Each structure stands twice: as C-alpha cells, then as structure tokens.
Amino acid sequence: MRCVNAETPPVSPQPPDPAAALAGPDTGTGPRTGRARGLWVPAGVLAGVGGAFAYVAAVDPNEPGHYPVCPLLRFTGLYCPGCGGLRSAHAFAHGDIATAFTANALAVAGFVGFAVLWTVWVVHEARGRPLRVPVGPVGLWTLGALALAFTVVRNLPFGGWLHP
C-alpha cells in the first residue's frame, strides 16, 4: 500500500506531445535526424544565392535595359554603396575578380564574407551544433560606418577609383 502525504499533491501524468504524435516514431533514418535536417537550410540558401548569381551571370548588367537604374544615381548623381553591385556580381560569376573589384569593392568583400560565413555554417550544422554569430551593436555600427565611409569616399574627387 502506498502512503500519500496530504501536503504534496499527486503527480499527474504529462499529456502527450501532439507534434511528436503527428511525426511518428523516430527511427533515425530520415530527414528527422538532426544532422540531415540541419543541412537543408544552408542548402536552400546556397540554391537561392546560386540561382541569383546564375541569373546575373546570364543576363549582362553592362547592357542597358536589363536592370533598373539606381534611383540615387539617377536623381542626384551620387553613387550609393550598391552601385555597380550587379556588374561586380556578373564579373565575379565569370571569374574576373579584378573587374568585380573595380565595379564595387564592397560587394566583392560581401561575396567573400558570405562564402566564408556559409562554409562555417555548414560545418557547424554537419557537426550538429547550431551556428551562433554574436554580432552586437558594435559590430553593426562598424559595418554601417564602413558602408558610409565607402559611400563618401567613392563620391569624392579623389575616390574616382571606386566609381563603378
């Protein structure tokens, strides 16, 4: 016979998890395993970025009429940080790094930064550890300051080498 203390309430069983009931048993052989499931998202991101690069590689932004003109450049004559980014991506996709760098150096740094971050992300996911990128306010302000400095210098007379 079991003695129940009047001060402690009886333990009720936990209700079943509805998501686990719908998912079925985990046999360890499908997309439910942690490592396989974790690689789907980086693969999807790579497919999207690769598709965008393939389109820009196929449709030359140096020919007028394929892409819209930058509104800031059209109305003010000033180059924004993204001006020349499509020409840079086109050259980068064709392996012409020097032309890509002259079209938009900040974009090339972004392409390389994305490739490095994506590779680190895939390695973390393959090992079953989520990627944590601790970009705090200082990092975001630094990136913003770099973009602003790039924009200011490329619009000054001595920054002509940064024009697209």
Image (tube, rainbow, N blue to C red):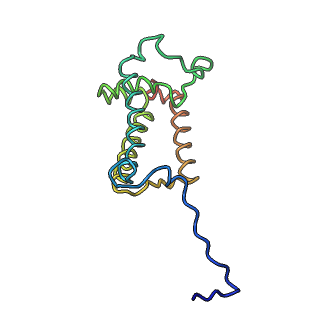
- Is 158 placed above or below 21 here? above
Above or below, 7 against 127 in this view is below
Give residue 41's position: percent from left, percent from top: 42, 43
Label count reads 0
Taking the spot 37% from the left edge, 56% from the top edge, the residue there is 128
Q: Quadrant of the N terminus?
A: bottom right
Viewer-proximal residue among 63 and 38:
38
Q: Residue furthest front?
A: 1
Coordinates of residue 123 in the picture (x, y in percent): 34, 51
| Residue 80 relative to residue 9: left or right | left
Image quarter of the C terminus: top left
Q: x and y percent of residue 162 in the render?
A: 45, 29
Q: Nearer the viewer, residue 41 or 113?
A: 41
Name the residue nearer the viewer: 103 or 3: 3
For the point 58% across and 20% down, which residue is it? 77
The residue located at (40%, 36%) in the rendering is: 111
Figure quadrant of residue 55: top left
